[in-house]
Image (spheres, rainbow, N blue to C red):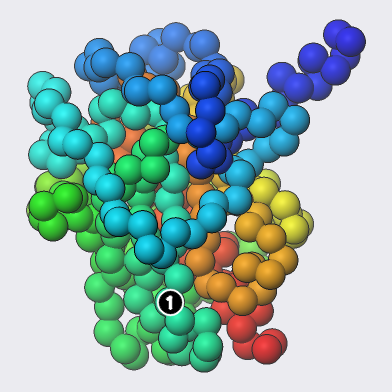
Amino acid sequence: MQSKETEAVSQPPPYPGTEPATHYPPPVSQVPYGSTGYVSGPTVPAQPTSAFLYHPATSGLVPLQSQPAAPVVWMPAPPVPPKCPPGLEYLAQIDQLVVEQQMDLTEVLSRFETLNRYEIRNSLGQRIYFAQEENDEYSLQCHGSLRGFVIKLFDSTNQPVMQLSRECRCDICCCPCICCLQELEVQAPLGTVIGYVKQKWHPCLPKFDLQNETRESLLKMKGPCVPCQCYRDVHFEVKTLDETATIGVMTKQWTGMAREAVASASLFGIQFPLDLDVKMKALVLGACILLDFIFFERRQQQRQQRR
């Protein structure tokens, strides 16, 4: 019995689904965040009872059932904490996010690449942001997932509150060389840089530093060898700077053979400490979209080309 409990603890924290439930997943870690290299955010009220279902026997999100006829429900605007960039106050009250790429029928029925769009929701299924890529047709069709991009995140008033940008990166090596390493710039509000997501060199594993506006590394993110993670959930851990503790997890959910083979739409779950600074939460969110472009957008394009 004790060995089973020990094995369960070593697994990445499970992710919620979208079915009603009466209890909430346990926190990722009980490490003292303030002593590990970054400052926690202001104290905020606890998140309402989650509408997610906790499945201790499985990992990853429960597959989401699309509801095309259901109206969009936005998260009510919370009070703005002190020193919080405008538009990021929504992140101050949550410790879980669902990031779902929106399916485009043009891309499903053809080989033409389209602009990426994402819906970001809280644990109650309420929309927090809607992300829209801005790009030109040449970059879409000729550069594919390697294209540079600008993605703006909009709130319920249709105002842009955050911007993610990446330059075009070549990909000519089996393992990334210095010229191929990825970097994402995060602005909130637009015109004000709050940090960067910078890829670190490793021959096999995806490793990233989450940096503030002065390029000081505050958190690290590490994942498995993605090509070896077929037909399963893929977990990326958010770690303290010394990598002694895992404070959050980002999961790319395996949505099933049928959807993965047909639809070019990724689904992610994110879990981080409630008291994590909102700027760092925004960087984790940006890292999620960057990971989609680097690893999963390319795999979807390869599947479409084989059709």
In-front residue for pair 53/177: 53
The answer to which of 216 and 274 lies nearer the viewer is: 274
- 281 or 124, which lies in front? 124
Quarter of the image that includes the C terminus: bottom right
In the rendered view, does 86 fall on the left or right side of 137?
A: left
- Which residue is the site of mark 1? 104
- State the residue at coordinates (86%, 8%): 2
In the image, taking residue 70 as reference, residue 261 lies left or right, namely right
Residue 285, image quadrant: top left
What kind of residue is marked 1?
Answer: Asp
Query: Which secondary structure lies at badge 1?
Result: loop
Query: Looking at the image, can residue 99 be seen?
Result: yes
Above or below residue 24? Residue 178 is below
When the figure is inspected, residue 160 is found, relative to residue 171, above or below; the finding is above
Q: Quadrant of residue 237?
A: top right
Which residue is depicted at the point 54% across and 52% down? 64
> Where is residue 76 shown, x and y percent of the image?
19, 36
